[in-house]
């Protein structure tokens, strides 16, 4: 079951990769190839400006920038690392084990 925040959903994630999925495209699948996919389940573009991904035991992982958006029905994928130029909608952050959550620009925890 995906959690939702005004149409923004944690739609897919991979943690503790058992070394079979090469998320970052470097030719080697390993534990750092983790990802979180956010999906826009609305009919309008959602601005990610001010949103942040946090990990309970490590703190802030990634802050989305002004201009970062997800088109209606589209996705944004935050990966542990990425080799080379990441495709549109991919954001590199040091993901880790634990409870990842989304917070708004004021630091209010919104989604786990």
Image (spheres, grey):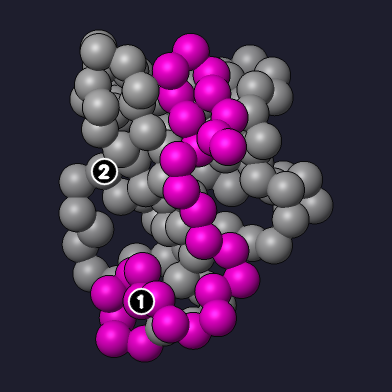
**In the figure, is residue 55 to the left or right of 41?**
right
Question: How many numbered circles does the render carry?
Answer: 2
Q: Which residue is the site of mark 1?
A: 22
Residue 24 appears in the rendering: yes
Q: CA distance from mark 2 to mark 1?
A: 17 Å
Q: Residue at the far front: name it.
A: 1
The local secondary structure at tag 1 comes to loop
Element marked by disc 2: loop
Q: Nearer the viewer, residue 8 or 79?
A: 8
Task: Answer whether residue 14 is magenta in the image.
Answer: yes
Mark 1 is surrounded, within 10 Å at the Cα level, by few (under 14), some (14 to 19) or many (20 or more) other residues, namely some
Residue 8 locus on image (x, y percent): 45, 24
Earlier along the polypeptide chain: callout 2 or callout 1?
A: 1
Residue at the outermost bottom position? 28
Check residue 86 for magenta coloring: no
Q: Are there few (<14), some (14-19), or many (20+) residues within 10 Å of tag 2?
A: some
Quarter the N terminus occupies: top right
Q: Quadrant of residue 103?
A: top right
**Residue 106 locus on image (x, y percent):** 63, 16
Q: Is residue 41 left or right of residue 16?
A: left
The residue carrying mark 2 is: 89
Mark on residue 87? none
Quadrant (top left, top right, bottom left, bottom right) of the C terminus: top right
48 relative to 92, above or below = above
Q: Residue at position x 43%, y 82% from top?
A: 20
Q: Residue at x 30, y 38 (%)?
A: 75
Magenta stretch bounds: 1-28
Please determine whether, in this image, residue 82 is positioned above or below residue 40.
Answer: below
Q: Nearer the viewer, mark 2 or mark 1?
A: 1
Percent coordinates x, y for residue 37 in the rendering: 42, 45
Q: In terms of image quadrants, where is residue 22?
A: bottom left
């Amino acid at each position: 079951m995906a959690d939702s925040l005004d149409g923004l959903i944690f739609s897919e994630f991979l943690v503790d990769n058992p070394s079979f999925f090469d998320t970052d495209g470097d030719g080697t699948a390993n534990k750092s190839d983790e990802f979180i996919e956010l999906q826009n389940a609305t009919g309008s573009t959602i601005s990610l400006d001010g949103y942040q991904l946090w990990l309970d035991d490590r703190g802030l992982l990634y802050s989305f920038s002004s201009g970062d958006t997800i088109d209606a029905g589209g996705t944004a994928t935050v990966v542990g690392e990425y080799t080379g130029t990441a495709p549109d909608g991919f954001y590199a952050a040091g993901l880790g084990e634990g409870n990842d959550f989304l917070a708004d620009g004021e630091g209010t925890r919104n989604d786990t």
